[in-house]
Image (tube, grey):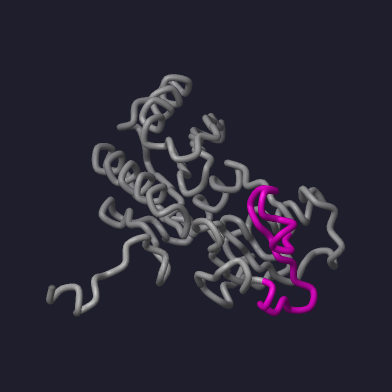
């Protein structure tokens, strides 16, 4: 299997190819510039791996929630590549990806901040930045000793909250709150987690093995209620 994963849902543009167990990676921090660099980064990755995009078997992408523009970029790129290659697509929940990465790092005892919680945590409350003063929050219960594809059970799906509302969210006993990167960690009372491309590959492979591959038209962004930057016109506006 030749698996490509790509993530443009955050400031980071992360790409990785897994070819027969060998991994090639191209990752850069390019806030608000993914559309300018993604195609060249993909081309560089294929050159390094000595592959053509038509060699792809499956493509995983972070479908959101995340940057409104970023998740649309990754979905569009994934769909275009999948159509050309006849590959299946694997939409990855950005929140599940963060929780999976946190589970691995806490098991390895290597979070970016020293943990004070039970080992291993019983669950994860994930926080992803939406835009200034707004975040997405979801909750995943951990299943001890389970395979990666069954290790986390979604107990509360993503909701959009103001930063000030996060402190009001109950954290179950034995759980930890995690956020990607250190910028928001202290203010949100969360442990900083660094998501790796290996986490993306592992989640994509697990979903694919569980029958989660979709045809190219399945490469669709995942939005959360209230997270679009555009607001519909009121009936009064329409009448004017």
User: Residue 57, how many percent across, how many down?
Assistant: 37, 41
Q: Nearer the viewer, residue 125 or 55?
A: 125
User: Residue 145, how many percent across, how many down?
Assistant: 73, 65
Q: Is residue 23 above or below residue 72?
A: above
Residue at 69% in and 62% down: 188
Q: Nearer the viewer, residue 119 or 98?
A: 98
Determine if the magenta segment contains residue 189. Answer: yes
- In the image, 210: left or right of 213? right
Residue at 52% in and 73% down: 157
- In the image, 215: left or right of 225? left
Residue at 87% in and 62% down: 116
Where is residue 40, by image quadrant? Answer: top left
- In the image, 49: left or right of 228? right
User: Residue 215, how many percent across, how many down?
Assistant: 29, 54
User: Residue 148, how many percent across, how many down?
Assistant: 62, 58
Q: Is residue 25 above or below residue 201?
A: above
Residue at the front extreme, as displayed: 240
Is the C terminus in the top left, top right, bottom left or bottom right quadrant?
bottom left
Is the N terminus in the top left, top right, bottom left or bottom right quadrant?
top left
Determine if the magenta segment contains residue 128. Answer: no
Residue at 70% in and 70% down: 123
- In the image, 186: left or right of 222? right
Q: Nearer the viewer, residue 16 or 94?
A: 94
Q: Is residue 53 above or below residue 8?
A: above
Where is residue 171, by image quadrant? Answer: bottom right
Q: Which residues are magenta?
A: 167-190
């Amino acid at each position: 299997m030749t698996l490509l994963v790509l993530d443009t849902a955050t400031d980071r543009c992360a790409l990785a190819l897994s070819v027969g167990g060998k991994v090639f990676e191209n990752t850069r921090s390019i806030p608000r510039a993914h559309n300018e660099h993604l195609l060249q980064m993909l081309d560089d990755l294929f050159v390094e791996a000595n592959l053509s995009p038509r060699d792809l078997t499956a493509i995983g992408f972070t479908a959101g929630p995340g940057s409104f523009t970023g998740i649309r970029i990754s979905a569009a790129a994934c769909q275009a590549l999948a159509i050309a290659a006849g590959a299946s697509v694997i939409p990855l929940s950005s929140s599940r990806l963060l929780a999976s990465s946190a589970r691995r790092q806490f098991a390895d005892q290597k979070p970016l901040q020293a943990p004070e919680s039970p080992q291993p945590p019983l669950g994860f409350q994930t926080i992803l930045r939406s835009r200034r003063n707004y975040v997405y929050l979801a909750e995943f219960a951990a299943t001890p000793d389970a395979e990666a594809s069954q290790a986390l059970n979604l107990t509360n799906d993503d909701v959009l909250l103001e930063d000030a509302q996060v402190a009001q969210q109950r954290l179950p006993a034995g759980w930890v709150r995690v956020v990607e990167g250190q910028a928001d960690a202290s203010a949100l009372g969360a442990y900083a987690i660094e998501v790796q491309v290996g986490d993306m590959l592992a989640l994509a492979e697990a979903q694919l093995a569980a029958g989660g591959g979709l045809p190219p038209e399945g490469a669709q962004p995942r939005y959360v209620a209230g997270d679009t930057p555009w607001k519909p016109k009121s009936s009064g506006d329409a009448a004017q």
